[in-house]
Image: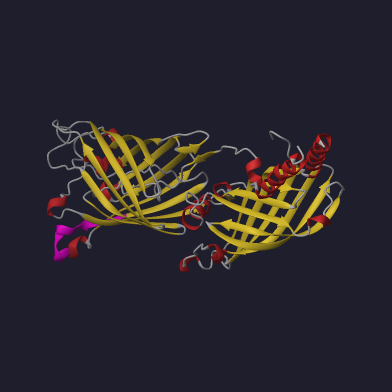
Amino acid sequence: MRVFSLLILLSLMVGSSVSAQKYFTRNGKISFYSDAPIEKIEAHNIQSTSVLDAATGRMEFAVLIKAFQFEKALMQEHFNENYMESSQFPKATFKGEIKDPAQVDFEKDGEYQVIVTGDMTIHGVTKPIEAPGLIKVEGEKITATSEFELIVADYEIKIPAVVRDNIAKTVKVSVELNYQPLKKGS
Amino acid sequence: MKYLPFLLLLILQTRFSAAQDEDLLSLLEEEETTELVTASFKTTRVVNLHSLENVAGGVLDVKISHRFGMLNRGPYELFGLDIATIRIGADYGISDRLMIGLGRSSFEKTYDGFLKYKFLRQSTGKETMPISAAFFASTAITTLKWQEPDRENFFTSRLFYSFQLIMGRKFNETFSLQLSPTLVHRNLIATSAEKNDVMALGVGGRIKLSKRVTLNAEYIYVAPDQLAPEFRNSFSIGFDIETGGHVFQLHFSNSTSMIEKGFVAETVGNWGDGGIHFGFNISRVFTVVKSKIE
């Protein structure tokens, strides 16, 4: 009886350590593009962190708002001060999962079209979103890319009438995450 | 003993469900980064005083500053509105820390040039710096016609130098405060009772009233027995209103001049009897060199 229980324990432990491969990145690239009649604005963040759990298909990412880089210093200042209020809401986060994770074989090289659903939190406001994505497996390297649109007003970010023609109501977001296996201590 | 496997299963079960709910990102150790504190003031001036802020590298800031006449001129001059003193200037950021500027004031037909270097930048996170500090130096040249052209006049008599240390802190989103110990050197002074070197201490602060509007005030204390008795300490108070690329500063000040040697050492207006100018600074920034982004 004792041996049996130990076996169960052992098998469960082994099982979990094999299937629970997790991947992470600290330099994920997240960009957004605002295309308004007067002005085109783009900003890039190359310090996003993300963890992907291959076993469950769950993924999370966090973006430091102040790490978005703009071409114009004043835009960056206004983005933080007036729109994102980044001192109050320093991070944007996403918590979600790959719909039907079984279709992605993380052990086998290839490209997999997926749909990711989850909760996006920006400017302190959480909204459910769903976006198409592409997962590319190359050995231990996993690249996840996605493009989707966000409605600025959904996140209670107010655009004053004066700059109505400078800032788009809907911004395009592109995400590029280069994952590597998460080992203890990384 | 019989129950052991069940017990183990139970333990594992809870372990697994815990793993399900765990915060994936918490698996990564938080990497601490240094964050510079930005926007302690809306622009590079409090009112007349240089603020803690520099223009960013590659950015040109064109400033039109204007002071009407004193309010106590009465209705004949529409409370000073008939009179105007103006400074037209341009500041440029060579880097995020170093800026230079040139200006021309109608008051005493003065040209001025300055350099401002931010050697400490307030930051939080990995490297914490509680204050920002900058060094400021300027030269001013008055170009009025000589009062007594018959006597021997020297070009050096037209020169004024100002040096300033600007130290301050953005305490929170709302409140920023700075101290500006100042030295103004005048090559020529009117009477021997005055000092060539004038020591002063400026204090400036702002309170953010809304995202785009702040209330600013500054006071410059000049140590006694350096100036002729008709000169007073400068006090200014006003609002900064930011609209995208512009900052409008609307204020009241008892100083006529908008440069250091003037508002520190040549202020004559008296707040007590309406010796106050209404005025404004308009700042418009142009990005000359765009920052490189990946």
Q: Residue at x 43, y 36 (%)?
A: B117
Q: Is residue B140 visible?
A: yes
Viewer-nearest residue: A67 or A16:
A16
Q: Is residue B197 left or right of residue B87?
A: left
Q: Image quarter for residue A20? A: top right
Per the image, is B17 magenta?
Answer: no
Q: Image quarter for residue B81? A: bottom left
Please state the horizontal and vertical placement of residue B176, each as a whole percent of the image.
36, 45
Position of A56 relative to B154 (above/below): below
Q: What is the quadrant of the N terminus of chain B in the image? A: top right
Q: Is residue A106 left or right of residue A164?
A: right
Viewer-nearest residue: A89 or A66:
A89
Per the image, is B67 magenta?
Answer: yes
Q: Is residue B142 visible?
A: no
Q: Residue at x 23, y 42 (%)?
A: B146
Please state the horizontal and vertical placement of residue B275, each as a whole percent of the image.
16, 53
Viewer-nearest residue: B269 or A121:
A121
Q: How many numbered marks, from 0 up?
A: 0
Please state the horizontal and vertical placement of residue A29, each as a whole percent of the image.
67, 49
Q: Is residue B98 left or right of residue B27?
A: left
In this picture, which residue range is highlighted in magenta?
A: B66-77
Q: How is the image coloured?
A: secondary structure
Q: Is residue B237 left or right of residue A166?
A: left
Q: Residue at x 85, y 46 (%)?
A: A107
Position of A93 relative to B146 (above/below): below
Please state the horizontal and vertical placement of residue A143, each as a whole percent of the image.
77, 49
Q: Residue at x 21, y 42 (%)?
A: B266
